[in-house]
Image: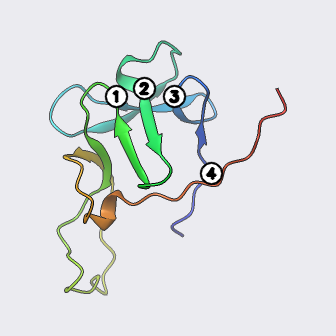
Amino acid sequence: GGHQYWMFSKQGEIRRDEACLGHGGEGDTVILYPCHGTGGNQLWVVDRWQRRIRHQLSRKCLTVSGDDIQDVPIPDVPEVRYLVLKDCKEENLKQDWIWFWVKSRE
């Protein structure tokens, strides 16, 4: 399915267990790294109202890959999709993220 459980930490990390999303350093790549807790390539800013996730260093938005547009339906044969960084655009629905916020017990 299209749902996964990820956490946004107080340090600005997007993490699952001990793995964090980070910029791959070249181009638009997003890679899972062991979390290091020092920001840098793993620092993200979530805008809950615009529903965008921006990588702090590159200033680009977390985006689902693929060339489909709203007028063209998703193909019957599933495509492999992955996360990339692209210029933030309000009309880009592949940059539209919904987060459910749960207060930490800490």
Residue type at numbered disc 1: Gln
Tag on residue 5? Answer: 4
Q: How many numbered discs?
A: 4
Dot 4: few (<14), some (14–19), or many (≥20) neighbours within 10 Å?
few
State how far apart marks 2 and 3 are (Cα). Answer: 5 Å
Which residue corresponds to the image point at 44% horizontal and 55% vertical from the top-left?
51
Q: Which mark is residue 12?
A: 3
Whole-percent x, y for residue 10 in the image: 61, 26
- Residue 103 placement: quadrant: top right
Residue 52: x and y in percent read 39, 50
Q: Looking at the rendered structure, which numbered label has been put on residue 43? A: 2
Which quadrant of the figure has residue 24?
Answer: top left
Amino acid type, mark 4: Tyr
Measure the C-alpha gap from mark 2 to mark 1: 6 Å
Are circles 3 and 1 on residues that touch, CB within 8 Å? yes
Q: Which residue is mark 1?
A: 56
